[in-house]
Image (spheres, rainbow, N blue to C red):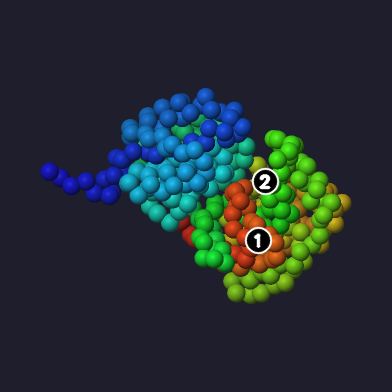
Amino acid sequence: MLAVTADDRRTTGPVAVLANPVAGRGRHRALLPRVLDGLAAAGRPVELLTAHDPTGAEAACHAAVAAGVSALVAVGGDGTVHRALQAVGGTAVPFAPVPVGTGNDFAADAGFPADPLAAVAVIADALRAGRTRPVDLARMTGGDGTDRWYGAVLAAGFDAIVNERANRMRWPRGPRRYDLAILVELARLRPRRYTLRLDGVGHEVDAVLVAVGNGARYGGGMRICPAADLTDGLLDVVVGGRFDRRTLIRVKPRIYAGTHVTHPLASSFRARTVELAAEGITTYADGERSLDLPVRISAVPRAVRLLR
């Protein structure tokens, strides 16, 4: 009897699928059977992972990778992708997102079609051909030694503070809760003192917005780090300085086009490692609540292999 090697499992084993049924507020739930059929057309068995919460989803991805799946596919938005990346980051297991979330920033920066079924066709073709494309991830380490991967952007300023307030609120439900959180935090807006170390070089800045991008986009298409490239081995750091409320409101729409970086109060940097510290900030990575500052972030070249 011939032994089945790890390489054999990676080319013939099952494709694990993590699906978030409430991604995009549930608009695409009926698509899931077509997504699974489209992936199965690549000629490999498909296994749908079951999980009841984000922690369970992450654990299911780790278990699937440990069991030797040939690929992992995340059906959802950036939050679902973020959970899956914790299992595939730094491994040889191919990965792909099927963008059905409210925000699909990593998938867009990685070049996947915005249409979910078109993305599935690209993934299935890559599976059949055994084709992958390596891209970078960011690796963050908290003060307690906790490590996390992220693919898109780490927010550590006004947007992170708004997310933190919205998550604490019980009313209203839906998008209005986030809108109300913005109004509350705009009323409380003040620059905070940040300590930045970029490849070991220290900077002290007063800012209302700090973003560290492996990719360019966050928040459903805002190009906060417009020059970021998933394949350059670098992190892009964008700092919004001492903006007052009126100026921030006026500049914020420009983030969608990425032209905010030309404002005199904005600064941009590039580095392989970023150390970031400030008082009272909980970061959000890929839109998900992440680590408290201080954190150390490293660009990890070719950390994940995309099915493209």
Q: Residue at 59% of width from left, 28% of height from top?
A: 27
> Residue 108: percent from the left, percent from the top?
58, 42
Assess disc 1: are there few (<14), some (14-19) or many (≥20) residues with their C-alpha within 10 Å of its C-alpha: many
**Residue nearer the viewer, 247 or 127:** 247
As helix, strand or loop, the secondary structure at mark 1 comes to strand
> Residue 28: percent from the left, percent from the top?
56, 28
In the image: residue 221, left or right of residue 11:
right
Whether tag 2 and tag 1 are in contact, CB under 8 A, the answer is no
Instruction: Look at label 2 and name its amino acid.
Output: Asn
Q: Label 1 belongs to which residue?
A: 237
**Residue nearer the viewer, 82 or 8:** 82
Q: Is residue 37 above or below residue 56?
A: above
In the image: residue 69, left or right of residue 273:
left
Extreme residue in the front direction: 170
> Residue 304: percent from the left, percent from the top?
45, 52
Q: Residue at 87% of width from left, 51% of height from top?
A: 246
Q: Label 2 belongs to which residue?
A: 167
As helix, strand or loop, the secondary structure at mark 2 comes to helix
Find residue 212 and report its image quarter. Answer: bottom right
Q: Residue at 79% of width from left, 62% of height from top?
A: 191
Instruction: Please tell me which of labels 2 and 1 falls first in the chain.
Output: 2
Q: Is residue 11 above or below residue 89?
A: above
**Residue 167 visible, this angle:** yes
In the image: residue 57, left or right of residue 26:
left
Instruction: Look at label 1 and name its amino acid.
Output: Val
**Residue 272 visible, this angle:** no
Q: Is residue 98 above or below residue 93?
A: above
Q: Residue at 56% of width from left, 63% of height from top?
A: 142
